């Protein structure tokens, strides 16, 4: 997978000089990266403690401080302060913060010298990890310079790769691509610091390459984070109708110099509440309400709840958008047949940064269609509904961070990432999306769709953890599927309408069969459910005409409506635990009907006909 490295201009402070050389041509199993470094910190007026570690391993998550055999000559760890330390405490002793970092006893901190690091085929990753503790009564920003520029040639030639990670600690730090700015929160008290972990991972990818001698000068600065004030909205820049903004006013259009940042207000300046940014509404089509937009930064105020279909479509001036937490779905004003965010930012070809607030629940069809400058997106955990073709044609998209791994199961197959050449790889006719999140590290893959319908036999990559929504939907030629033992989740409709699929075994670890997962698999005669399964959602096996028998594992506690609807040949349903089951006709039904399920034929009849419209629960 090729990735485009983003370079950010920054302020020099921490000098880290690294010499990179290899003697001769690298063998197939070993390589040498000689690192010599001198670290100097500048953080005048900022009270931070830096705890640095050099780690190595087979991956970022496996990397650890090298000790004993193979340990570099010099220091693999480093600790320094921008202040004199109080007795028995890492907090400042009240003295002024210093440009020259100090040891715990107040003496000048020594250089961080690192010797030879030996790469092998088992240890290909070196991680520079910084834990920064902030005792300042304000947020501090760290800025890094130098490493991407120095190694750009190696990255372009795919000899090395660089990736950065941020989080509150080493374990929770997640990938940020190649982001060289990170923030450390303010202290919670004079002795309780805010903290942040920042990691730079360098991975040696090509052992057969001859790497010339090179030198890296890396800098990290710590300074008070300057929060840029948000401009006040200018109400006269917009036109209004009822509780909606319908477009840009003539006053905005007549401006000789347009404002760089445009704040979209949640009132009209006269006390009237605004909740909607109009798009396509009723009989009046406002296809491009912001077609005359020339501002680059869009900030939508808290209070706006709805963004209409195509509201910002084709606004080429937009480079960044901030979406407030009050928006729960991007959706048309009236046309209910269009769901959420349809084409809201379609063809915004310069949009490179978008912030989605927690609280958003729905992202609709083609939301970021053809946003060719978009490189990364973080999806809030509150999003549970994804439309199709959301990132269609986002050719520079490098990473999708999902703050909830459950979101993976709701992503619509390959249509979501169609044309995303930087994030999709094809292997054995199956495409994979790499996800880097708090719960899903980069070694976890999600299958997101099949390249062609000519595929008949599918073997999912053994590292795959999640199968997306509609993975094989309507792929009628598939006759067999081999699922990996480490699979964690399967999305709704994953195998629906695979009418030639005859058998499948769901691996241990799967806890839920989602809605319509095997609906209309009319040739399915044999399915093995795992002992870890706890619930089966509605219509999961509906219209599986060839299914004769199935065993419901002991841990299953709920079965949705119409789970076995129109399974005409289903004769036997064996419950591993047939006791304490009740069926409920509606959500208001608190009593339910108790069932005796010790007879497999009766259980089959109840599920496919008598109580098929009921919700089943085990007490």
Image (cartoon, rainbow, N blue to C red):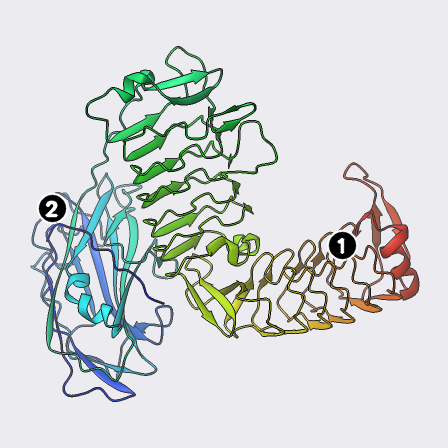
Q: Is residue 247 above or below residue 3?
A: above
Circle 1 Cα neighbour tier, 10 Å, few/some/many (<14 / 14–19 / ≥20):
many
Question: In terms of sequence position, does the residue under pointer 2 or pointer 1 come before the other?
Answer: 2
Q: Give me the residue at 21% from left, 41% from top.
A: 225
Whether residue 234 appears in this view of the structure is yes
Residue visible at 23% across and 60% down in the picture: 51
Query: How many C-alpha atoms fall within 10 Å of the one at disc 2: few (<14), some, or many (≥20)?
Result: many
Examine the rendered structure and indicate whether residue 80 appears above or below residue 381: below
Secondary structure of residue under mark 2: loop
Q: Which mark is residue 97?
A: 2
Q: Position of residue 248 (x, y in %)?
A: 35, 22
Taking the spot 52% from the left edge, 34% from the top edge, the residue there is: 331
Q: Is residue 599 visible?
A: no
In the image, residue 92 sits, relative to residue 211, either above or below, namely: above
Residues under numbered marks 2 and 1 in contact, where contact means CB atoms less than 8 Å apart: no
Camera-near label (2 vs 1) is 1
Quadrant of residue 601 in the image? Answer: bottom right
Q: Residue at x 63, y 59 (%)?
A: 473
- The residue where tag 1 is placed is 559
Q: Which quadrant of the structure image shows residue 607?
A: bottom right
Percent position of residue 295, x then y: 27, 31
Q: CA distance from mark 2 to mark 1?
A: 62 Å
């Amino acid at each position: 997978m090729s990735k485009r490295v983003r370079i950010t201009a920054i302020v020099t402070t921490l000098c880290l000089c690294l010499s990179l050389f290899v003697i001769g041509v690298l063998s197939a199993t070993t390589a040498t990266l000689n690192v010599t470094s001198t670290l100097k910190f500048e953080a005048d007026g900022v009270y931070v403690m830096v705890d640095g570690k050099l780690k190595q391993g087979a991956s970022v998550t496996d990397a650890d401080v090298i000790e004993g055999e193979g340990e570099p000559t010099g220091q693999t760890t480093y600790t320094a302060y921008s202040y004199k330390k109080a007795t028995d405490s890492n907090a400042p002793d009240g003295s002024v913060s210093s440009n020259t970092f100090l040891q715990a006893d107040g003496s000048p901190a020594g250089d961080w010298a690192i010797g030879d690091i030996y790469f092998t085929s088992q240890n290909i990753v070196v991680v520079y990890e910084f834990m920064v503790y902030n005792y300042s009564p304000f947020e501090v920003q760290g800025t890094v310079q130098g490493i991407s520029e120095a190694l750009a040639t190696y990255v372009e030639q795919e000899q090395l790769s660089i990736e950065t990670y941020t989080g509150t600690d080493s374990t929770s730090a997640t990938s940020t691509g190649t982001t060289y700015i990170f923030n450390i929160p303010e202290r919670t008290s004079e002795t309780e610091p805010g903290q942040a972990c920042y990691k730079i991972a360098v991975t040696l990818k090509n052992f057969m390459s001859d790497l010339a001698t090179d030198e890296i000068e890396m800098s990290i600065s710590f300074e008070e984070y300057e929060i840029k004030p948000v401009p006040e909205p200018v109400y006269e820049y917009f036109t209004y109708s009822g509780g909606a903004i319908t477009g840009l006013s003539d006053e905005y259009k007549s401006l000789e110099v347009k404002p760089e940042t445009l704040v979209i207000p949640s009132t009209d300046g006269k006390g009237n509440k605004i909740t909607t940014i109009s798009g396509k509404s009723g009989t009046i089509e406002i296809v491009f309400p912001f077609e005359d937009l020339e501002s680059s930064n869009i900030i939508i105020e808290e209070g706006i709840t709805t963004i209409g279909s195509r509201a910002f479509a084709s606004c080429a001036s937009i480079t960044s958008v901030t979406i407030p937490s009050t928006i729960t779905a991007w959706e048309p004003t009236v046309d209910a047949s269009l769901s959420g965010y349809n084409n809201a930012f379609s063809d915004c070809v310069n949009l490179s940064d978008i912030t989605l607030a927690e609280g958003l629940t729905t992202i609709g069809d083609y939301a970021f269609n053809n946003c060719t400058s978009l490189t990364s997106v973080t999806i809030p955990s509150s999003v549970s509904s994804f439309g199709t073709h959301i990132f269609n044609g986002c050719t520079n998209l490098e990473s999708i961070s999902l703050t909830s791994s459950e979101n993976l199961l709701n992503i619509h197959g390959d249509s979501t990432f169609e044309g995303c050449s930087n994030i999709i790889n094809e292997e054995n006719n199956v495409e994979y999306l790499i996800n880097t999140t708090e719960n899903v590290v980069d070694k976890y893959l999600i299958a997101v769709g099949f390249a062609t319908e000519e595929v008949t036999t599918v073997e999912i990559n053994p590292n795959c953890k999640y199968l997306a929504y509609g993975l094989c939907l309507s792929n009628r030629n598939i006759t067999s599927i081999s699922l990996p033992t480490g699979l964690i989740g399967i999305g709704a409709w994953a195998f629906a309408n695979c009418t030639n699929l005859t058998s499948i075994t769901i691996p241990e670890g799967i806890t839920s069969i989602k809605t319509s997962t095997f609906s209309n698999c009319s040739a399915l005669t044999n399915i093995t459910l795992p002992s870890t399964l706890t619930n089966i959602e509605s219509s999961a096996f509906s219209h599986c005409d060839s299914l004769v028998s199935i065993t419901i594992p002991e841990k299953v506690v709920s079965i949705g409506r119409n789970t076995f609807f129109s399974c005409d040949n289903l004769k036997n349903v064996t419950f591993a635990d047939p006791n304490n089951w009740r069926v409920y006709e509606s959500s208001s039904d608190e009593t339910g009907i108790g069932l005796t399920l010790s007879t497999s034929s009766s259980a089959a009849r109840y599920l496919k006909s008598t109580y098929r419209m009921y919700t089943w629960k085990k007490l």
